[in-house]
Amino acid sequence: MVAQNIAFGIISGIVVFSALRMVTTRNIVHSALFLVAVLAGLSGQYVLLAAEFVATTQVLVYIGAVMVLFLFGIMLTKAPIGKSMEMTGTQWPIAAGVALMLGAVILYSLIDQFGSDRLTEGGKIYRTADVGDEVFSTYIIPFEAISVLLLAALIGAIVLARKD
Amino acid sequence: MIVTTSWYLVLGALLFIIGGVGLLVRRNPLIMLMCVELMLNGVNLSFVAFSKALGDIGGQTVVFFVLVVAAAEVVVGLGLIVAILRRAPGSTADDLSVLKG
Amino acid sequence: MEALLAFTRPPLDWHALAPELTLLAVGTILTLVDIIWDEKSKQVMPTLAGVGLLAGLVPILTLALDGTDRAMFGGAYMVDDFALVMKALFLIVGYIIVLMSVDYIRDGDYYENEYYTLMLTSLLGMLMMASSRDLISVFVALELLSIPAYMMAAWRKGGRRSNEAGLKYYLMGVFASAIMLYGMSLIYGLTGSTSFSSIASAMALNDGVTAMSILGVLFVLIGFAFKVSAVPFHNWAPDTYEGAPTPVTAFLAVASKAAGMVALIQLVFVAFDNHEVIQPFFWLIAALTMTVGNLIALRQTNIVRLLAYSGIAQGGFMLVPFAVAGQASERALQAIVIYLIIYAFMNLGAFSVVLAVSRKTRSGELESFGGLFQYAPGLAVAMTIFLAALAGIPPAGGWFAKFGLFRALLDAGGAWAATLGVVVAINTVIAFAYYARVLGQMWFQPIHEGDERPIKLTSALGSALVIALVATMAFGILPGLVGHFGEVAVLSTLGR
């Protein structure tokens, strides 16, 4: 268990630090790279939680596909690289204050409710095949629906982004 | 000292909050989009942690759907941002002022 | 290999899925036709889409005649009478919007074929929403209906306003869905299940409301409050409505809002049955939404923005019955369903008139309606009927919707319901003021820019107008008609 504790601590530190830097840095490419660090760290956490399917898809879909899209987006829009970028809107202290208060409430109630819950030890570990069974039986309709959604997103995004 | 569910939940909540604050504070549409991804990752971590704690597979299945939908959302978002920035390079969300609330 | 062989195909009820499958098939045909004939296919596209939507009504009819509630996947996907009524409404609304779009999209140099594909996709999501009784299905249905809508709002590519409308709608939408998902994760953690019926029974077992369950329920409801543009989550709506192409605005204001309401109905009446936080929450946002929507509508000079804020206020009226969901659940559900059906037709009618007038005047300002009665008396009378309906004046349909609200509030009784009733009454009066302003403009003001050419109605737009008009009047004169739909639209779980 000690190994898991240490791994959890190290990865969490990296994830939280990267998330904070992602939100605060002025350089948009750095932001994207910090997001990669967050995503990779979370993939590690999923391994610790014995969720192999989620851990692999996290790497494949998020780091492999979504982040590449982001980098393309940065290049296509010729977003200013460097420190010229405007940071914040005018009302940001109010927004941040409200969000932080809400955050404190969330954290308090999380610890209040689940503080003493233990992760089930030695419970059934769900493999990729189990997730597959679930997706193709109980959730077959949502599964078909997201395939339609992906096609629609593809068609629409091409129409919107093409030059004409 | 044993890692309990709540540790993962707190980490997930932290990511969710950081993403939420970022979305409200930052004004570059691309960064706002990244903040949404951060929030969704917080959600995913909570789902997986609950899935493990409950010994139920449902949480992992949700994450699969969230991942795919997030990818579709990013595609659409980038399409919109490319369309808008092509017309007005260097826009921030505050410059979107032709329409006033 | 073993895992592969161990898998058994889930039993699927093809008849129950027929409406969705029809729509999916039509969408696929549309895409194929577009690919094969490209430019030449533009003429047939709207016809195909419209016929497809009407074809979807056939299986709904056979399912309604059959009359049994069909549950799939342990109740995760439910085809009951409520779902059927809502699906029929979505299909008819979709058909009317296709009629409204035909000439607008054709004349405006838009991408035509893709537009109809996206609209069908979004409608497919709405059909799915009406049957979803599971957090995952609801989430996927919500995204399936929203993501095409984000793109449709930005469909006028050349116009900066439209681009902004799309981006603003998109950013608010994804933010809302992230919040909703976080709420869903908390609820999943508390109840250990994603299906509504299990959530309801688990919540009934966990006596004592915890901070966590309040947060979870609130986050999920807030996610949908964005969708139905309830105050204070309404910021995106007026800008998006004004910037988006007008038929898309009608789509967002009617179909998309109805889908959000359907989701709220299922969540409130099935999943979070009688959770303590629901009634105060809805009391507050219903009162806020009505009041703020109406007060801001008073100051609008642009007709589309006026309709947008009036739509927000109407949404507030629809949220009222949720506030008494506990005491008079059956009446409340009926009131919402009836309001939704009537609202759909009267609002679509008003948007059709706006479309027809702006085809000539090329303006969205209120002044462009000046003297409408003198050169287009038919349109002026139609608009008068729709506005009277929206304001709730008999014999146009809207009065029955408001009547339903008061009936639900009376049934519930008590000080809170009574106060809310007073708020509804005050807001009805405020709404008179701005609807009357449009009427005054049409009937008594001089003709806009002295241009007396009559307005030529295209056949498609004319049919949309006639359908909306007939439905609005029919619901007003024969309220039993829509009342019947309200009564049969019973969620199959209500009789638990």
Image (cartoon, helix red, strand yellow):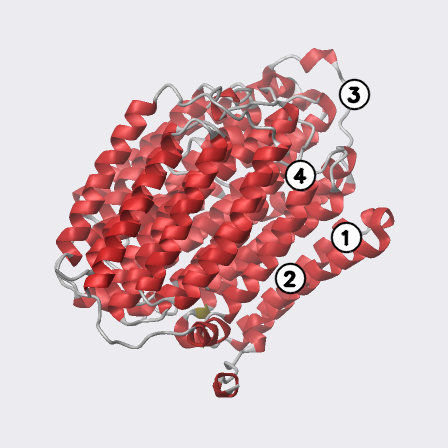
Q: Tell me the residue that label 1 is attached to.
A: C47
Q: What separation in Å lies between label 3 and label 4 (alpha carbons)?
A: 36 Å
In the image, residue C40 lies at what x, y percent?
87, 49
Task: State left or right for residue C253 relative to residue B42.
Answer: right
Mark 2 vs mark 1: in front: 2
| Residue in the foreground of this view, choosing between B93 and C3 | C3
**The C terminus of chain C appears in which quarter of the rendering?**
bottom left
In the image, residue B56 lies at what x, y percent?
31, 71
Q: Which mark is residue C445?
A: none
Q: Residues within 10 Å of mark 1 (few under 14, many from 20)?
A: some
Q: Chain of mark 4?
A: A
The first of marks 2 and 3 along the sequence is 2
Q: Tell me the residue that label 2 is attached to.
A: C23
Q: What separation in Å lies between label 1 and label 4 (alpha carbons)?
A: 24 Å
Query: CB atoms at circles 3 and 1 under 8 Å apart?
Result: no
Q: Tell me the residue that label 4 is attached to.
A: A160
Residues at marks 1 and 4 on the same chain: no
The first of marks 2 and 1 along the sequence is 2
Q: Chain of mark 1?
A: C
Q: Please state which amino acid type lies under the numbered disc 2.
A: Leu
